[in-house]
Image (cartoon, rainbow, N blue to C red):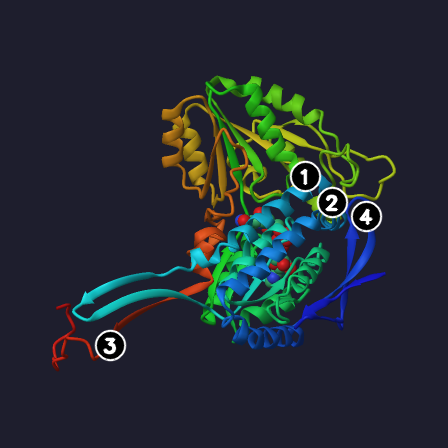
Amino acid sequence: MRSIEHWIGGTSVAGSEYATVYQPATGQPQARVALGGQPEVDRAVAAAATAFESWSEMSLSRRTKVLFRLRDLVERHEDDLARLVTAEHGKTVEDARGEVIRGREVIEFACGIPQLLKGAYSDQVSTGVDSYSLRAPLGVCAGITPFNFPVMVPMWMHPIAIACGNAFVLKPSERDPSAANLVAQLYADAGLPDGVFNVVHGGKAAVDALLDHPGVAAVSFVGSTPIASYVHQRAASTGKRVQALGGAKNHAVVLPDADLADAARQITSAAYGSAGQRCMAISAVVAVGPVGNQLVELLTQEASTIVVGPGDQPTSQMGPVVTGEARTRVIDSVDEAQKAGATLVVDGRELRVDGHDEGYFVGPCLLDRVTPEMAAYQQEIFGPVLVVLRADTLDEAVGIINANPYGNGTALFTSGGAAARRFVRGVNVGMIGVNVPLPVPMAYHSFGGWKASLFGDTHIHGPEGVSFYTRGKVVTSRWPGGTETFRSDFHFPTAS
Ligand code: NAD
């Protein structure tokens, strides 16, 4: 069986233990991945610390040359990366290509690092004295990432960290680890010095070793809320800078003045694309006023026509979920919702895909008449399940969203600007769409939720990413020998 090894200091390092990597479309083992722990993390952090010394001294133009080359290589290998993702995650190749492109856009943003790191200069802040500010890299930064975007989410982190002059250790998801190794190879081909980008595979042991390591200056985490909270607390307790992005329950609110057919199409693609395994997936609809029945009818029509199949078949619109456990979790949540009184309008629980009996397939499920007390609403199901709630007014819908513990993304469907403005100002959510179901910010803005969807102060990539991976210095300087003479004063310095 193919082995996926660690990548440390510019070379492949064999594991001492391994876990199996399955193919979700067939349910069959396809590779084994090394499981690292303290020794591998120690080795990777040491390699990164050594590489940091020279990489952080490298001129901006030499750093950006590497990033421009990486950008081209990622574009050239778009299909290879996408197919690795499809084989291990299960999403369709088209969908996987989309994540590679969105990841590449972060590299493109990082290519502008000379502009982004430009400090500020104030001439003559006092007589004969100038002042300027600059951003310095942190050292060794770590990234711990989830299974659902094995290319894009790590690329939210490492291109910016590395462009800022840091070295990086990535701990990708053990469920779909191969893409990280191809990215490491592309960095090497782009001319990145050995040790600046490292990959340690594994699970909790590798994560804990990174969180506790005194040589790691900053941790970026993306994953589920309980682990995000844990990572935030444990890494912060050892003095590290931490950003930990968690789970989500993203609502789409549909007002009576919306184009209902358009809203239903858009909500369906945002709910069931990638089998609902996106942190920005719409998983709850709030139908406002009289639109409920008509909207549910339209959503039913849309969901019933989705073609479910292996991600590498061009006709498939939705692939399997990532594991057998995930499939069971999805089906159990739907069973429970039905028992709690919700109406199951579209039932994908029994779906079978020809020739893929062991695959982790589950079809789209649509639950109507769900209430905020039900587990299907409260929990992040992270599968192809959309729940519909009803509200009398926009304000009631905003109240439902704000009472939810998560605050990642949300969308409003309307033709009215005043309602849209009220919605944007009223919701306690980090990323908002107006007639846009998946408002994933472009690379030059920052991505992040509120409440239980993000622990820490800074959002990821974009300008906040540059702030996260650097710290400020302000220099106040005076050069004796000019016309001014310095008197010895014992009062606190003030400008003169
Ligand atoms: P997960 O939390 O299970 O795993 C994320 C990472 O943490 C993996 O690298 C994993 O190996 C590690 N990990 C798992 N259990 C751990 C433990 N007990 N101790 C230490 N480390 C541990 O998440 P997942 O299932 O891979 O991904 C899906 C989740 O990620 C969903 O909740 C989704 O909403 C969330 N997500 C959020 C965003 C966002 O931007 N907010 C983006 C993508 C995914």
Q: Is mark 1 within 8 Å of ligand 1?
A: no
Lower position in the chain sequence, tag 4 or tag 1: 4
Residue beneath the point at 42% across and 33% down = 398
Q: Mark 4 — residue?
A: 27
Q: Residue 54: horizontal and vertical position, in percent?
A: 54, 75
Residue 251's disc number: none
Read off the residue under disc 3: 479
Q: Where's the C terminus, which quadrant?
A: bottom left
Q: Which mark is residue 90?
A: 2
Q: Quadrant of ligand 1?
A: bottom right
Which image quadrant: the N terminus? Answer: bottom right
Cα gap from disc 1 to disc 2, whole angstroms: 9 Å
Tell me: is circle 2 under 8 Å from ligand 1.
no
Does residue 231 appear in this view?
no
Local packing at callout 3 (Cα closer than 10 Å; few below 14, some 14-19, many 20+) is few
Classify 10 Å Cα crowding around label 2: few (below 14), some (14-19), many (20 and above).
Answer: many
Kindly report the distance in space between the C-alpha atoms of the residues bearing marks 4 and 1: 16 Å
Amino acid type of the residue tagged 3 in the rendering: Trp
**Does residue 427 appear to the left or right of 361 in the view shown?**
left
Does any atom of ligand 1 lie closer than 8 Å to the CB of label 3? no
Question: What is the x, y in percent for residue 309?
Answer: 78, 36
Which amino acid type is marked by label 4?
Answer: Gly
Measured in 3D between alpha carbons, the distance from the residue under mark 4 to the one under mark 2, in whole angstroms, is: 10 Å
Up-down relation of residue 118 to residue 53 (above or below)? above
Nearer to us: label 3 or label 2: 3
Residue bearing the label numbered 1: 275
Q: Amino acid at mark 1?
A: Ala
Q: Position of residue 171 (x, y in %)?
A: 63, 63
Residue nearest the viewer, comparing 204 with 410? 410
Is there CB contact under 8 Å for labels 4 and 3?
Answer: no
Seen at 60% across and 34% down, the residue is: 270
